[in-house]
Amino acid sequence: MTSDNLEIGRIQGRQMLTLLPQGGSVLYIQGPSETDACKLRTAGMYEVKPESIQIKTIKGNWTEASAYKAVTSWLRLSTSQQAQIDLIAAQNDAMAAGAKKAFQEFSLEGEGRGRWMNIPFIGVDGVPSTGQAWVKAKTLTATVIAPPIAGTALEMLVKSVHTGTNPAECTMLPPKSYPDLESLQAESRRGNARAADATRGI
């Protein structure tokens, strides 16, 4: 039993499209490239995202600290100062949180860097106490809920014992966007309207 990591990547690609309907540039923080989760989530994302969305990839190690370090190093490069980044996407919520921390600290270091603070951050896992809570608190813009495996596996085991049937050799649990894509689109439009009003001094 496993999460459908390919579909997780597709959902994150759809979130990118929802948040960047006109296209743009995404800083994409991957987990270790040798892991199946990283490979499948990346493949799913590329399968869905349009050509108008450009991807810049950096590596993390599934932890908040690894993403913080990787993003901090990237931000210190002279080339990053000219980079146009419209969205930060990480392959899990911990790395998204680490990336946001790095951007927040960097934005305090000098003038003109506040532009980084209006960028959406999205992640994956959607655990109620972390990812979902961070979306509610506006720390993250969105996440992808990967359903917990243990409970479903136990239910399948109990059913198998009671019915005398063997469960499927492989079961993939379907992920879902949090918030759903319609709500994400509506919130994105409201945010864009507020930003436009602020620019006009309304």
Image (cartoon, grey):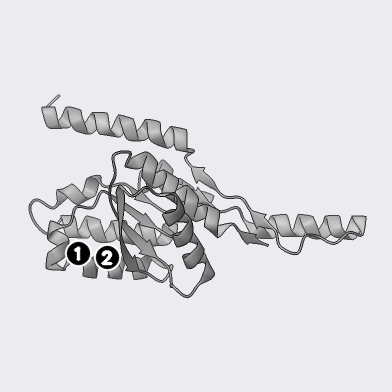
Q: Which residue is mark 1?
A: 75
The percent position of residue 54, horizontal first and vertical second, equals 29, 54
Query: How far is the residue under mark 2 from the one under mark 1?
Result: 6 Å
Q: Residue at x 31, y 60 (%)?
A: 99
Name the residue at the front extreme: 51
- To which quarter of the image does residue 30 belong? bottom left
Name the residue at the left extreme: 111
Is residue 124 visible in the rendered structure shown here? no
Q: Nearer the viewer, residue 64 or 175?
A: 175
Above or below, 162 against 197 in this view is: below
Q: Nearer the viewer, residue 162 or 176?
A: 176
Q: Tell me the element at label 2.
A: helix
Query: Label 1 near label 2: C-beta < 8 Å?
Result: yes
Q: Which residue is mark 2?
A: 71
Q: Tell me the element at label 1.
A: helix
Q: Residue at x 45, y 53 (%)?
A: 47
Is 171 on the left-hand or right-hand side of 119?
right
The percent position of residue 65, horizontal first and vertical second, equals 35, 69
| Label 2: how many Cα within 10 Å (few below 14, some 14–19, many 20+) | many
Q: Residue at x 60, y 52 (%)?
A: 147
Q: Nearer the viewer, residue 188 or 93?
A: 188
Above or below, 49 against 67 in this view is: above
Q: Quadrant of the N terminus?
A: bottom right
Please name the amino acid that badge 1 sits on.
Leu
Above or below, 178 against 190 in this view is: below
Please name the amino acid that badge 2 sits on.
Val
Q: Nearer the viewer, residue 91 or 50?
A: 50
